[in-house]
Image (cartoon, coloured by chain):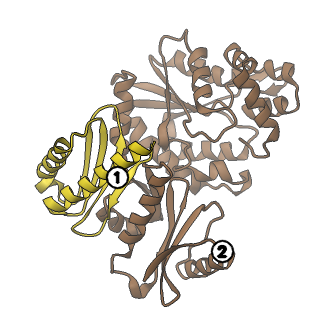
Chain colours: A yellow, B brown
Amino acid sequence: MKTIVVGSLESSDCLITLQPNENTEINIESTVFAMYGEQIQKVLTDTLKAHNIENIHVLCQDKGALDYTIEARLITAIKRFKEAKDES
Amino acid sequence: MRIHDVVLEEEKDQVQSFLKQFDLTYEDDIDDTIIITENDCIIATASTSVNIIKCIAIAPAYQGQNMTSLLLTEMIKRLANKGINHYFVYTLDEQVPLFKALGLKPIVQTMTLALLEGGKNIQDTLQKLKTEYAINDASKAAVVINANPLTLGHLHLIETARKQHPALLVFVVSEDRSVFPFKARLAIVKKACESFDNVTVLPSLDYLVSYATFPKYFLQKEANIREEHAMIDVLVFKKYYMKTFNIVKRYVGEEPMSEMTAMYNKTLKKYLTNQLEIIPRKQLKDSVISASTVRNLLKKDHQDHAYQYLPQATVDFLETKEGKDAIRRLKKRATRH
């Protein structure tokens, strides 16, 4: 199955990459990791939970995106991920 | 302003002359190029070659407007579409901070060149490999082989190294560009080393003699490969593999035949100094054993002659259907691997 990539590397945005995985794994690369790493982790985990997504690898390359930007990007990625899954 | 693909030859020519202003050459191994244009003029470009993003340039008037992130995002998405989630960027030394700000991780730097990666990170990847193969922290020796296919020469190298050290790691080149598939190469080496209790056979992953760290190895004619091409690979080994696995010595076979491998060994010697041991090649009658000789013999249907140079594990593989397919592919190939 194809990988899903959503977002951009522009300032105040993030690039989300989704891949099927054996378990749920979240990787965060952020320019503000020291300050907001935990918060980003929380947003990602909560959003995955809210959409009942498991066994996925999430890579979030963040350039200082706000919570709702990250959430919106992830929701879009999840939608595309589900579409791609249904197709295959 | 819009982004588009470069398809036509004349467009390629335009990119080529655009790159020239930055002293960059449009390399012939490129498989995808994009440009950003404004009023039909190229203002920025980037290319990919398998998992490497390179030939990145932005017109001076447009620098400082975050064009790089535009180019990079587009390229990352295109690579993901091809199923590539681990990518590398080759760039000039002074551009490293720019790419770091975009979330890429520097791996190594030479005097002029820097290699960065995204999507994965070498430290975590090697740490995972270490855990997966239950490798302890005791000091070890290492060899790195492509084993295309495994010969008695490789085995001699492994035997020599394992006798002088309590533990030996055998890295089999993971890059799947050789006529014998990686899976088969790894399986043969594992089989041949089965009875050695102090040897661990493991994949070299994306970082050793890989397309990313040593692209020229797979592309160029031997004569065109120079020291600087091997340097990145050698530095990666020294900085990450030796540290992570506590490797104190690397063993290589002496290289009387291939100029390229000889040069690679020379570069290794320069950076590893006394941590590198060069072992004379094993000889059979009057000729030294080498995988390329074996491939040539197989190509010409001199099976029996080739088998004299091979351990049982390799011979067994060659007799399987998969092995016969590999020989068939070999006959069709013109390249070295």
Chain ID of residue with mark 1: A
- Disc 1, SS: helix
Residue B259 located left or right of residue B161: right
Q: Mark 2, residues whose alpha carbon is within 10 Å: few (<14), some, or many (≥20)?
A: few
State whether residue B164 appears in this view: yes
User: What amino acid type is highlighted by mark number 2?
Assistant: Leu
Residue B8's disc number: 2
Image quadrant where residue B262 sits: top right
Of badges 1 and 2, nearer the viewer stands 1
Mark 2 and mark 1 in contact (Cβ < 8 Å)?
no
The N terminus of chain B appears in which quarter of the rendering? bottom left
Chain ID of residue with mark 2: B
Residue A80's disc number: 1
* Residue A72 coordinates in the image, percent (x, y): 21, 59
State whether residue B290 appears in this view: no
* Residue B182 coordinates in the image, percent (x, y): 59, 32
Residue sitting at x 66%, y 54%: B225
Residue sitting at x 24%, y 63%: A63
Image quadrant where residue B124 sits: top left
